[in-house]
Image (cartoon, rainbow, N blue to C red):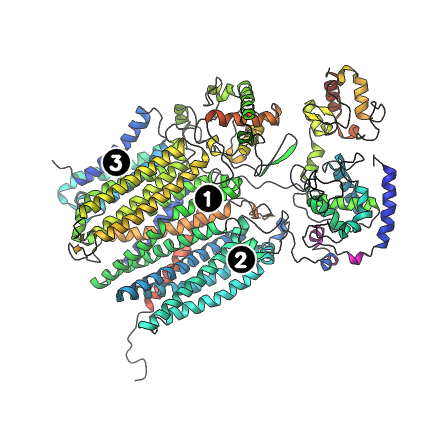
Amino acid sequence: MKIPRLLQAVLVLVGVYGGFVLVFDVILEQVIPSSLLNMYMFFVAAGTYMVFTFNEESTEQIVAPIKALVEDPSRKKIRNVVFVVLPLFFGLFTYQQMKPSFEAPLELRTIHPAPPAAVKVFGKRYNLLTLVNPYRKFEKEDPEKFDELVNEGGAVYIKNCQYCHGDKLDGKGPYAQGLNPVPLNFQDVGTIAQLQEAYLFWRISTGGPGLPKEATPWLSAMPVWEDFLTEDEIWKVILFLYDYTGYSPRSWEHE
Amino acid sequence: MRPGFLIKMGGALLVLSLGLLINPVDLPGIDQLGIDAGAAFAADESPAVEEEAVSPYQPAPKLTEKDYPTFLGFNGRVFVWIAAQLHLWFAAFVLAVPIFVFIIEAIGMKTRDKRFDSMAYEFIKVSLTAYSLTAILGGLMAFGLLVFYPHVMGYMTSIFKESMIFYALIFFAESACLYIYYYGWHWLQGPFKKWVHLTIGLLLNAVGTVLMLLANSWLTFMMSPAGIDAAGVFGGDVWVAMHNFLWNPINLHRFVANIAYGGSIIGAYAAFKFLSARTAEEKAHYDWMGYNANFVAIAGLLPLPFAGYYLVAEIYAYSQQMGITLMGGIFAWLFIIQAVLIGTLFLSANYYLWCGLGRSEGGVRYYKYMKYLALAIVAAFLVWFTPHTLVLSNEELKALGGPYHKYLGPLGIMPAKNTAVNIMILVTYLSFLYYRRANKIATVDWVKAGNAAQIALFVMAFANIFFLGIYHGYFTNTVYKVAASIPQVLTTLTVIVISTVIDSFIYKNSKEVAPQRWGRVPPRSQYALFLLAVSFTWLMGLMGYIRSGIRQHWHVMDVFRDNSPDAFTPSLGYATNVISVATIMFMAMVIFVFWLAQISGQKTQTAGFWKE
Amino acid sequence: MKQFLAVIGFSLLTIAGFTGFSNFGIPRIEPAPPPTEEKIDLGAMTMDQFIALGERTLNGKGTCKLCHNELGRAPMLEEIIPNTEKRLADERYKGASKDLAGYIMESMVMPSAYVVAGFGKSGSNDTVSPMPDVSTGSIGLSQAELLAIVAYLQDSGGAEVTVEIPTDVGNAADEEADAEVRDPITDPLEIATEFGCGTCHKIGEDEGDLGPDLTTIGATRDREYLRRSILYPNVDLAEGYEADIMPDDLGDTMFAVEVERITDYLAGLK
């Protein structure tokens, strides 16, 4: 038996919705955020509408049952039911959306807030637009020295950073569980791989309290490393972060 | 006074005696390079110092709230914002229409198909009234700037005075060209005269483009100032100030976007005429016109994302701070709105093409493929839409163990978006290809081979785009990440070009399945054209806000600070409300323009009014 | 007309949809207001106060005296006024100023415009000055401060003060304001950084060689001596070092707790 077009369209929508939930929530075990899923479904619905109505024949088949429901005298009963149930359904939906709950309001964290033009740390003012890692040049000039610097950076990391950011730099250090927001995962392509070293220098030296307002509420537990590390140590640890993860900092030259 | 007090005193005495010898008149206060800012600071108070000035250039003024006049309780920023936006919409329309009118006229001249000529004429007729509105709104914007931002205008004028005068003069040339082009349309017909007319059309476009380039240089100067020092003192070379870092990226982006925008507005005009048409001929004519306008809009839309990426890449290269403000900070959410709008554009453009399959019986053969195209384009669009920062409820946050989503997170960054947009473009092109083939049957004997080649081409292109996106996007460093987008773009463009060539050869001398019946499209498809035009207008407003907004509290980035009460960056909701209001105002004016175009062709027969 | 209204309705709905999504579909973020600018009240300043500001800047924030002193790292500032005319006429002069005020201003922001013979960067044959542009970078003097320095140099050199007090300076001296309200520093090495000890002394990671090496000073000197040397540097002089080199106003600029911390720290270096 051929499934009616309207039912097909509904099945497609339900199927896609179920598919998203199944794939993300069950199979991959990484829930799909409802805000995102709603938008996804809106556009899936738009796409479905397009496919089912771009030609007359198909549109006819979609519209006919709806038209019949509204106009056909023989369907009075079902019409009355639908006309009662549908408003109730939307009413309920709206109520569910709007009713006050104990859920804390959504918090949005901008992971990479825009850096200031200059930052004042270590008693000096650094221009973040032109600041470069003084040790980066050794990568080409003197690889041995560079390796040494990376090792020193690694030592700094192990002594200071790994408790939260993890010994694999994946943000899963021993203390990570206790923190919200969780420590940054440097292995993720969306973090240090997207940034310049000056940006890291800024974030490390001024820590959570140094975040601009747009990245707040800053519950970030990142210490102000300016108070604990030297400038040199920060630059070395930055070398280490990139070296270990295999990423390169975003560079000035757009080659 | 610690060290060498005596030496110092000795020096001072020496200086004192020398100082008496030197006649201060010989020493003008300001040097050529304008390094001495003292005079500038004191300029308002002390005419004496001003008289001494040799360099005409002053550093950027340091303003206070009091330097921004108020006028009748208007909010200066919103006034200038809306006036500028309206001006820009009309200007984009007015600049773009002559470009494709010129092309359509040339096509008509080549094919000797009168329909093209009359369509081109109708297009230019619509843009004529829009032209004077552009000038009026430009004047309103300039007036707003002078009233509300006199110091800013003063500073900008001091640097760009030559190009501003030139701009005003060139407006005469533009008007002359446009009026001759329009009013001489029917006069300049015939083998030789048509050439003259076409040349005037070319001239009109050249002048229009120069106008746009000049105006662009002023605004890009505000974003990426050049030719001035850190205090804003102008070095004297206007070309350096014009040819600033972001000038060309903006030029390219605007040029391409204008064409797409002009096409979409004309499309809306045709759609409205189609819907209100009474006769089959009228319907057929406006359907055809709408189709052509939509074709122009899509042709402009396809390269637009590339121009956009080029612009953003250059913004990043100019200043990481500006780049992150744009893509990572609060404006990141504007790009989610932008994604929705661009998705809308692509979806409605595709939908319009699919609806067009119904114009002939032959299109039915391809109905079954549309669902796969829809699948591909929606899937690509969902990737394009996925934000970098996910909005998570507390429960979801807990379930994920943090704000990072293992699988959706990687979709939030550029390589995924690049891949998605290339797929969207290719699919849109495929829609167009199907449409082109709808009513044709190839007669050449290598049809199979040709089709196989095209299929192979597309498969390879998709594979290559995915490979570049995934491999270079996620497994190499950032330099390659950005670099990978270039071969992706090249793949897309190559496929479009080669496939068009192959297709045109396959369908050379092809047979028609059934007569192409213009006018046989559902009204729904016409609403797709409206959606295209409205989304495009709104999107341009949004992008204008972003482009201007990333300067934050600077008139001229990092040089000339905005100290007005409105220096703050408005919240997204507020900004989009302003954009919506401006869009509605624009729509009202466009309706007026269309209405004028309509009544100009109407004649009322009066009996007994005039003396016989 | 019906069509017209339908189209208008459709367009308005589309716009409403976009507006609604932008207002409610994405998180509502209030962008941070522009950073405020701190101002020094120059309007109420007399020329004497302005000159005093110049002196403070020269000795303090400008860090000019670190090099422009008798140790020969840079030319003495007292030599400017007698030599300006000569320098401006010199063929090696690359700047564009015509008078004293312009020349001093230029020297601060374009130090290489004229390099006094013998003071250029090594190897540059006196064409490049080792001095930074003091209006940028970590020194970052504001226009007002630069002008104040010009005024001070003109005044102290006995020339006529030709600069005017700027009436509005934008983000003039936020540093100045900072300095007045700063909190005491607790970390001894940071104290050393703040007061520039490392420029002349070997301390922490700094390797200054103009003053005595402090890395093992605690082994030979007691706390009393160290404290006295900080507050009154000319009282006890280490052998081989001259008087009047170390600033003698540290007692005015340091917090008592800072003096104690750094004394403790130095005494502990053995």
Q: Is residue B27 magenta?
A: yes
Amino acid on which the number 1 mark rests in the picture: Val
Is the residue under label 1 in contact with that under label 3 (CB below 8 Å)? Answer: no
Instruction: Name the residue nearer the viewer: B240 or A35.
Output: B240
Rounded to the nearest angstrom, the CA distance separating label 3 from label 2 is 50 Å
Q: Position of residue B553 (x, y in %)?
A: 56, 45
Instruction: Name the residue nearer the viewer: C56 or B453.
Output: B453
Disc 3 target residue: A13
Q: The residue tagged with tag 2: helix, strand or loop?
A: helix
Amino acid on which the number 2 mark rests in the picture: Gly
Measured along the vertical axis of the image, is residue B283 above or below residue C105?
Answer: below
Instruction: Respond whether the residues carrying marks 3 and 2 are from the same subunit.
Output: no
| Crowding at mark 2 (Cα within 10 Å: few <14, some 14-19, many 20+) | many
In this rendering, the label closer to the viewer, 3 or 1: 1
Q: Position of residue B466 (x, y in %)?
A: 33, 36
| Crowding at mark 1 (Cα within 10 Å: few <14, some 14-19, many 20+) | some
Instruction: Respond whether the residues carrying marks 2 and 1 are from the same subunit.
Output: yes
| Segment tinted magenta in the rendering | B23-48
**Residue under mark 3: which chain is it in?**
A
Q: Quadrant of the N terminus of chain B?
A: top right
Is the residue under label 1 in contact with that under label 2 (CB below 8 Å)? Answer: no
Q: The residue tagged with tag 3: helix, strand or loop?
A: helix
Disc 2 target residue: B144
| Crowding at mark 3 (Cα within 10 Å: few <14, some 14-19, many 20+) | some
**Residue under mark 2: which chain is it in?**
B
Q: Would residue B268 be found to the left or right of residue B216 on screen? A: left
Disc 1 target residue: B312
